[in-house]
């Protein structure tokens, strides 16, 4: 169903001063925490009627040229993670040297584009045709050398284009990767750097890790924990035995959920769209699990919902918003199962999350409170059981316009590898709405869809 037409390497422009430079970046503790994670894998689907000849003769050369120009401003994406063979004396780092490049695959697919961009449950395995694998690691005398980024562009003749991109999470967070994709799209659409430089010339991406204040040497604490775990290459989690589906909360739905919460909890004053969305999805996921699982779980069991929080402006001293790397804290809601699946589960979850986010936003000491203990093993049970969320409506990847308009659909494929995670982004079809991406076993997805729809009829 897919034909690989070309695999190539795209470096920054060889003639540029940046391409001739060498850049070494130590990993901050924000980066080290992700060093064992599987890559983040995303797909952007664009509706664009195009023949294979136009694609290969016009669009692909333009994408390659603009990618090269963009990498001049984002050198770490063309570089590698250096993982020390001697972990006792050395720490990992990111390095770019002249000649480094990004792997780009060009393909054409005969799959049904409209089926892939639908919201209904679809076999999750088929999406891996469009996901680029991170190229295999190599070794020198001191380090494993691991590429950090890969791309694939796939044509669906006459219907659309998919851009797949995979990155090691230790390279950067969602804000960072979205910034790169927006820059590449802008340079590709405009045919040069002028528009990008006008917009970002005085605020280019900041790679300097010294902007991260780490007086407790948390990077060393995390590395002591991480270096004990064998380093394994990334792999696809297939067969997934899952289906993927997308659920939309329209602006009217979000308004209704907020009103339901504030009617019972007026002291909260304000409840964000994220809070009611996360609370509604969390409680629905738990109810769907109860509906399909035979065994009687202890309803006093603690359930967890974890979400990443961009803390660039929430820590002291603050970090520039254009910092490229990871700068994420974590929010964890912890509530008994029986309270969440009860009639007032939405209210319980929303109140807890609202207060948690308020504390993290208003008190800069709260955002990273206890961060030095994140890797001490005491949270293992939390990470194993928690429902997680990938992405944020704040970083609108679908607005990356390569000249074909906004993306029709974003799929965060990497949630397939999680016990229970969702993706979250702005809705393309509903102004002010949010799209929730889900990856679940088929029976669980059927139960989730029914409970999700019924809850909105109230």
Image: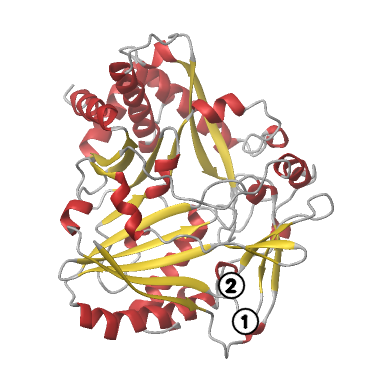
Residue 253 seen in this snapshot: yes
Left or right of 207 in this view: 382 = left
Question: Who's the residue at 48% across and 13% down the image?
Answer: 301
- Binning the other alpha carbons within 10 Å of mark 1 as few (below 14), some (14 to 19) or many (20 upward) gives some
Residue 396 seen in this snapshot: no
Task: List x then y, in percent, for residue 331.
Answer: 54, 33
Above/below status of 60 relative to 169:
below
Task: List x then y, in percent, for residue 384.
Answer: 53, 28
Identify the element where label 1 is drawn: helix
Q: Which residue is mark 1?
A: 18
Identify the element where label 2 is drawn: helix
Q: State the CA–CA distance, disc 1 to disc 2.
A: 8 Å
Residue extending farthest bottom: 15
Res 458 quadrant in image: top left
Residue extending farthest right: 89
Above/below status of 268 relative to 416:
above
Task: List x then y, in percent, for residue 281.
Answer: 34, 30
- Binning the other alpha carbons within 10 Å of mark 2 as few (below 14), some (14 to 19) or many (20 upward) gives many
Instruction: Name the foreground residue: 155 vs 323.
Output: 155
Left or right of 103 in this view: 444 = left
Q: Which residue is mark 2?
A: 75
């Amino acid at each position: 169903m897919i034909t690989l037409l070309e695999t190539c390497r795209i470096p920054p422009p060889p003639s540029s001063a940046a391409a001739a430079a060498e850049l070494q970046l130590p990993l901050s503790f924000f980066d080290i925490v992700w060093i064992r994670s599987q890559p983040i894998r995303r797909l952007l689907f664009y509706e664009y009627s195009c023949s294979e000849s136009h694609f290969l003769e016009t669009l692909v050369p333009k994408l390659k040229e603009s990618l090269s120009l963009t990498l001049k401003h984002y050198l770490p994406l063309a570089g590698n993670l250096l993982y020390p063979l001697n972990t006792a004396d050395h720490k990992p780092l990111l390095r770019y040297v002249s000649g480094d490049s990004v792997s780009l695959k060009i393909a054409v697919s005969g799959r049904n584009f409209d089926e892939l961009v639908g919201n209904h449950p679809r076999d999750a395995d088929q999406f891996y045709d469009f996901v680029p694998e991170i190229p295999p690691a190599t070794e020198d005398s001191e380090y494993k050398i691991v590429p950090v980024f890969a791309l694939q562009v796939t044509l669906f003749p006459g219907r659309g284009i998919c851009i797949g991109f995979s990155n090691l999470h230790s390279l950067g967070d969602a804000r960072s990767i979205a910034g790169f994709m927006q820059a590449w799209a802008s340079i590709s659409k405009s045919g040069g750097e002028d528009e990008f430089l006008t917009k970002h010339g005085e605020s280019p991406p900041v790679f300097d890790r010294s902007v991260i204040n780490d007086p407790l040497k948390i990077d060393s604490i995390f590395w002591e924990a991480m270096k004990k775990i064998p380093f394994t290459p990334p792999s696809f989690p297939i067969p997934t035995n899952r289906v993927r589906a997308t659920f939309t909360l329209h602006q009217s739905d979000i308004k209704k959920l907020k009103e339901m919460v504030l009617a019972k909890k007026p002291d909260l004053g304000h409840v964000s769209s994220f809070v009611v969305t996360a609370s509604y999805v969390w409680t629905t996921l738990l109810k769907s699990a109860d509906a399909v699982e035979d065994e009687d779980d202890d309803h006093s069991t603690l359930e967890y919902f974890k979400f990443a929080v961009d803390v660039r402006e929430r820590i002291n001293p603050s970090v520039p918003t254009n910092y490229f790397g990871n700068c994420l804290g974590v929010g964890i809601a912890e509530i008994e199962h029986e309270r969440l699946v009860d009639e007032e589960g939405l209210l319980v979850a929303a109140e807890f999350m609202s207060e948690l986010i308020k504390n993290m936003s208003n008190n800069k000491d709260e955002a990273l409170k206890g961060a030095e203990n994140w890797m001490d093993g005491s949270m293992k049970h939390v990470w194993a059981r928690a429902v997680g969320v990938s992405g944020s409506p704040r970083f609108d990847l679908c607005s990356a316009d390569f000249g074909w308009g906004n993306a029709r659909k974003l799929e965060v494929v990497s949630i397939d590898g999680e016990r229970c995670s969702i993706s979250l982004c702005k809705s393309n079809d509903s102004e002010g709405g949010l799209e929730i991406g889900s990856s679940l076993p088929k029976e669980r997805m059927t139960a989730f869809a029914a409970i999700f729809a019924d809850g909105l009829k109230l």
